Image: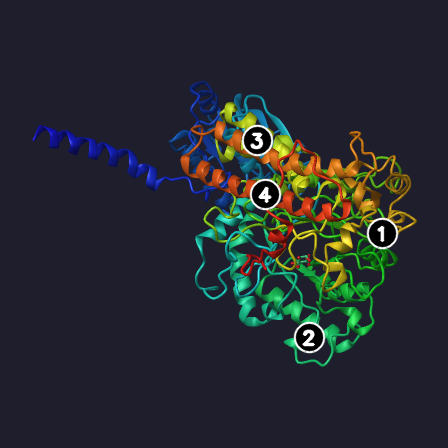
Amino acid sequence: MKRYRCFFVKFLLCLFFLIPYQIFAEDGYRLWLRYEPIENAELRNEYRSMLREINFPGESPTFQAAREELNRGIEGLFNSKISITDNDSIIKEGTLIVGTPSSSDLIAASTIHDEVSKAGKEGFIIETIETNEKQCICIASNTDTGVLYGVFHFLRMLQTRKHIKNISIVRKPRIRYRLLNHWDNLDRTVERGYAGSSLWDWHKLPDYIKPRYKDYARANASIGINGTVITNVNANADVLTPQYLEKVAALADVLRPYGIKVYLTARFSAPVEIGGLETADPLEPEVVSWWKNKVDEIYKYIPDFGGFLVKANSEGQPGPQDYERSHAAGANMLAYALAPHDGIVMWRAFVYSNEVPEDRAKQAYNEFKPLDGKFRDNVLVQVKNGPIDFQPREPFHPLFGAMPKTPLMMEFQITQEYLGFATHLVYLAPLYKEALYSDTYAKGKGSYVSEVVDGSLEDHRISGIAGVSNIGTNRNWCGHTFGQANWYAYGRLAWNHKLSSGEIAEEWLRMTFTNNIDFINPVKKMMMASREITVNYMTPIGLAHMMGRGHHYGPAPWVDEGRADWTSVYYHRADTGGIGFDRTVTGSNAVSQYHSPVAEKFADIETCPEKYLLWFHHLPWDYTTNSGRTLWNELVHRYYQGADSVKWMQKTWRSVKGMIDRERHNKVSEFLEIQKQEADWWRNACLLYFQTYSRRPIPEKYDKPSKSLLHYKNLEFKYVPGH
Ligand code: GCV
């Protein structure tokens, strides 16, 4: 009997410990907004002494959202509530004062009033002030949205355990339009999406509002994203019909308090497809008035609608060239309709055609540069970071710095179409920074892409940046827990491109996992190395575009059939003489699209950075690289180094086991194993294939690929996500 009792007690104890684990299991849903309790008593006391009470008057929906977030954050961080009042007549020492000069008399009367004006429309200040001889912290802005951003920033300081005594911070975004682009279809599939279905549950909208929409808005507002294009650039005109506009309006209502505007993709042929016209020619008056009426109608549903994103005459999409009109004519027609409502057009420069007998890398520049100065002032031309298509590494797009009269938006990909989908851990901030801090020399040394994008180089009125989202219905939003870091990093850089990749990684790790430095240091190191590691096992030394046809999954450097510019051989140009795309004067001369001295630097093999070598040059297999190895041996070295480094990532991740929750640790471990296998696959398939041209051995010191080239060539994948 005693034995049974003992067993029963043990059973109850197990339940006691297990149930909370089950209920509170870390599934990644809370992203970086977890607000876990502060363990360090000293810091806790410091925080509490400055947070005795909160004074936050004002009733706008944005203020309500900010107050709700403050409550949520504080309850989580301190395991207790702090009262929020709107009575500013009795202020205690250690009150957090929040608001704008018009919502808060305390702020209006305080000396920080002048400081606030420096923060602009969306910026904020956080400052320790003396009011009625009491030390208080004040979060202030000129606008309600700025206040919300300030609240999120303050919560981030607490989450990352920053000291809050004597603070004086002014923050404002460098770029005006900071957008996510969802390539989400109305049937809820997501083009190049690897994290489940589309968030937008069109069928149940507008009546059912998923709680997720609000959490999506919170996450975006916490990093300063202020707009979202909710439909695919490969557009469907149906979204412009009343049936869908009603649904879009319901989403816009949820996002609005969080400072996020909704944008749509406009299918250029919509006047024909849903408007019953016979043409979509942008110079036809009936087409112009159709769009004008359509835009007016949209604003009736969504009074703060942001505008349109357009992919035209690219990859089969309709556009003005179908009527022998220019991209400018098409963009301006839409811009004309949007202008009275303060809406914008984001017109994509991602255009190329296999019918044009020109290097694909040159085509967008050739098409758009002559149009500089021909766009209306509410048009931004949206340019991908590189001249091909979101490859693991590309040089910067030559259009940056080539269209001084036109605001150019940067388009990055957050979803990992070419970077291992949602199972490879690849931290993308270093890729974004590499592009943003490339020097165009457009106005001499120091004319960085970032300055073209933020508008400061040419003093543009508007500026923008877009990130193709990696978000879906997966419980953890992005598929891979570390995919969240790329969403986060994109937003932080969109707000301030000067932040370093390392500091963003550290912020994210602290908020997403733990403030334990024994965890942060090695994992941050792993994140920082991950992009270079991936480049090495996929496309080292400037190679590009060698993935599986159509679905883009895995290596397929042998693809040589179908549309030439969608084959791999078009890009790597391997033959028995060597490998690489000659883009110098003896080849396509794409180098000439860059300003001097960038053009000369890329053109000369002595000065071309090795990371871009095979992007710009076709070189013999025995060419001596910087390491002293032959090109073939260097290629082998990079592929093995890349794939072996994934083992190092696995080891690093194993070393932090026990420092975070089991659930997320296990999932990342399992994904790292997939990454390891796929890195080996990339290495083996590419080297075996290139070896048929190089006719050189893989040096003895490396383990030989265990499978044959034929094995890799025969692999077929029918149901790949995102395709
Ligand atoms: C949305 C690449 C992708 C396409 C994508 C296109 C684009 O070609 O593979 O899926 O289409 O880029 O950016 O428009």
- Kind of residue sitting beneath label 4: Ser
Dot placed on the residue nearer the N-terminal end, 1 or 4: 1
Task: Say which residue appears at 53% left-offset and 47% top-offset.
Answer: 478
Name the residue beneath numbered marker 2: 271
Front of the two marks 2 and 4: 4
Which residue is at the front of the view, 240 or 369? Answer: 369
Circle 4 crowding by C-alpha within 10 Å: few under 14, some 14–19, many from 20 = few
The dot on residue 706 is: 4
CB at disc 3 and ligand 1 closer than 8 Å: no
Dot placed on the residue nearer the N-terminal end, 3 or 4: 3
- Kind of residue sitting beneath label 2: Pro
Circle 1 crowding by C-alpha within 10 Å: few under 14, some 14–19, many from 20 = some
The dot on residue 648 is: 3
- Kind of residue sitting beneath label 3: Trp
Front of the two marks 1 and 4: 4
- Kindly give the residue lying farthest to the top in the view shown: 42
Q: Position of residue 217 (x, y in %)?
A: 53, 49
